Amino acid sequence: MTDPTRSRGIVERRMKTLSSGLLLIADITGYTAFLRESELEHAQGTLTALLEVLIGGTRPPLTISKLEGDAVFSYGLEDFRLGGQTFIEMIESLYVAFRRAIETMVLNTLCTCNACANIASLDLKFFVHHGEFLVHDVGQYREVVGSDVTLIHRLTKNTVTTTTGIVAYVLYTEAAIEAAGLTTLVATWMTHTETYEDVGTVHCRVQDLRPVWAAATNQEALVLAKDEILLDVWIEIDAPREVVWDRLADPAYRALLFGSDRQEIEGSVDGRTNADSAFVCYHGDKVVRHVIVEWLPFQRVVLRERAPLPGPPAHALQSFEIQEVESRTRLRRVAGRPTGPGPYRLIARMFYRAYRAEAIRGLERFRDEVEGSLPQGSERSSP
């Protein structure tokens, strides 16, 4: 009698489609040497903890394909993409989370074994490529195969560190840069090439991640005192945190929040919006500049604007904050008291009391457009 299990195939293949999109490998640097010089049990515990950081930080629109020893391999389909700056910020944020995990382990361990003593020697590097690949489900796992998948794995064996001395970096292939719209953003990064017999020369750009970590460790968050807050409204959006942040940085979507005719960005550096850039808001003949004083990707942006009050110029801080709430993303808008003479405080309180309903309508417009921008069938919430 034929085994019915075998007749169906022991491994059930549910889906098999040719797709295109971004491919990403996050690879822990120095783990082979760390493992060789350390006690196996403690070394394995360290790897598990660090892989959990990478898994938790690999988020929509990326999907994890599989774990590969000391690396995480993921992909993002073409029909669900973020802006180029947001994608770069996703990788930078993942690196910062990894470095903080390393720092916490070093500070908290009292163990004197080689494994615990050598934790600080570990680091992280990323590889980003774009191309075609076959996605097929094997049981409960999703496999990604193809020549471009082979190429990105070949790139993990490279000459970046030997030629530059940089241990922590992101290597973007020319194909990834073009497909993700990164050309302006990566223009100042170092060029690099790798050559393989069966592939030829692969042109790349390399981002040194050391300045990213240095900037993160020196960053101090601004705080709006509770008694200074005049407006505090929020809304929940059925979309991943990364998508909400991406749209929050997009002038077309920001115009919905403020009910303006349009918004523009000025003061970008190498195509990136950051602290000291400004959103310029047009309301008919009226122009309002929102200068960015704090830019924390996927967390919040704080703006300084001239308060809409008569008399001498008065400025106020306003923040947009992002928080995950179960399977949704909460976007919170907060406005503080303006500077200036005492009467301004009373006028400002009256203004924001009347403005609250419009601020909520702006959040609703923003929510509707963000949710409508997601492709059908995409994962709308974070994992």
Image (cartoon, rainbow, N blue to C red):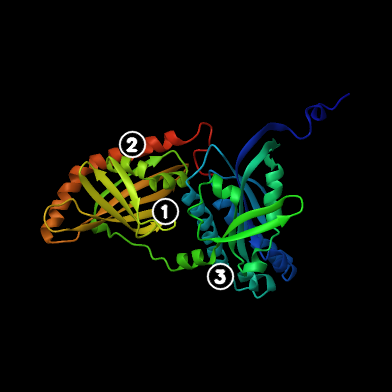
Residue sitting at 59 percent across and 64 percent down? 168
Residue linked to disc 3: 108
Mark 2 and mark 1 lie on one chain; the one further toward the N terminus is 1
Q: Earlier in the sequence, mark 1 or mark 3?
A: 3
Report if the CB atoms under discs 3 and 2 are less than 8 Å apart.
no
Q: Amino acid at mark 3?
A: Asn
Give the CA separation, mark 2 to mark 1.
21 Å
- Amino acid type of disc 1? Gln
Q: Position of residue 91 (x, y in %)?
A: 53, 55
Confirm or deny contact between disc 2 and disc 1 (CB under 8 A): no
Q: Could you say which is closer to the camera, residue 330 or residue 62?
A: 62
Task: Identify the image quadrant of the N terminus.
Answer: top right
- Residue designated by label 2: 365
Earlier-in-chain disc, 3 versus 2:
3
- Rounded to the nearest angstrom, the CA distance separating label 1 from label 3 is 26 Å
Quarter of the image where the C terminus is located: top right
* Numbered disc 3: secondary structure: helix
Q: Residues within 10 Å of mark 2 (few under 14, many from 20)?
A: some
One can see residue 34 in this view = yes
- On residue 367, the disc is none
Tell me the amino acid under the disc marked 2. Arg
Q: Which mark is residue 299?
A: 1
Does residue 47 appear left or right of residue 363 in this picture? right
Residue 15 in which image quadrant: top right
Real-space CA distance between mark 3 and mark 2, rounded to the nearest whole angstrom: 46 Å
Using residue 243 as the reference point, say whether residue 178 is left or right of it.
right
